[in-house]
Image: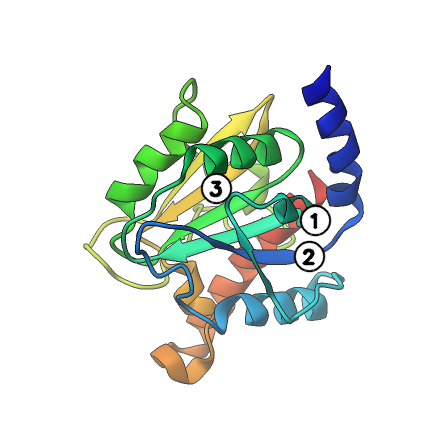
Amino acid sequence: MKKLLYILLLSPVMLIAQEIAVLKYSGGGDWYGNPTSVPNLAKFCNQNINTKINTKIATVEAGSPDIFSYPFIHMTGHGNVVFSDNDVINLRNYLTSGGFIHIDDNYGMDKYIRKEIAKIFPDKQLVAVPASHEIFKGPFAFPQGMPKIHEHDNKAPQAWGIFIEGRLVLLYTVETDLGDGWEDPEVHNDPKEVREKALKMGANIVNYAFNN
């Protein structure tokens, strides 16, 4: 009953909010990487999919109740990630009560984040998100699934997810580096079409998080 009350109290906040935050975590990984990426994504969404996201992006800690104010949490980095017991409980409650996390491997995060995701959901497995999933259908169409933005290990871009009652609550993107594509043009000197592809896929993720 206490858990149910907790969820009922917090869910409406997420349902009415249109905000994004960056997740701060322990372990030594650079959670603060790609500083211009999420503000640029927010601006793109406001201009193209009728959102009203604050482009001054907040930072929230994994164990903080403040995460419940944000229906979309973005996480990135290159290195180690460690979630404490409190972080695990908080993130699990957040995701099971309507929250959404997008984890984007900025290269080097994979071997660390998978074991931390398993701590949050020990009874679930990361599964491949198929190209037929709703997140790839709109507002922008990606019939082949996750686009490739930056090359890492000469592997195909991957989208992995945790689903709860059919809803995608955690999206983990690997070998794509969407966040690099969202950065200011001069950071990586990506062609305009590559940046647009990354931003459009990001807008799809935001749209899914806000509307499902």
Find disc 3 in the rendering and name its residue: 171
In front of the other: 67 or 18:
67
Residue at left offset 41%, top offset 56%? 76
Using the image, determine if residue 201 lies above or below residue 81.
below
Residue 60, percent across and down?
56, 54
Tell whether 49 sits left or right of 101.
Answer: right
- Which amino acid type is marked by label 3? Leu
Up/down of 95 relative to 145, above or below? above
In the image, farthest residue toward the left? 153
Q: Quadrant of residue 2?
A: top right
- Which residue lies most toward the bottom here? 186
Mark 2 = which residue? 19
From the image, tell me which residue sits under label 1: 69
- In this rendering, the label closer to the viewer, 2 or 3: 2
Residue most extreme to the top: 1
Residue 106 or 203: which is nearer the viewer? 106
Which residue appears at 43% of the width and 32% of the height? 85
The answer to which of 118 and 50 lies nearer the viewer is 118
- Amino acid bearing label 1: Ser
Residue 57: image location, x then y, percent: 60, 66
Q: Is residue 7 visible?
A: yes
Task: Tell me which label, 1 or 2, sits earlier in the chain.
Answer: 2
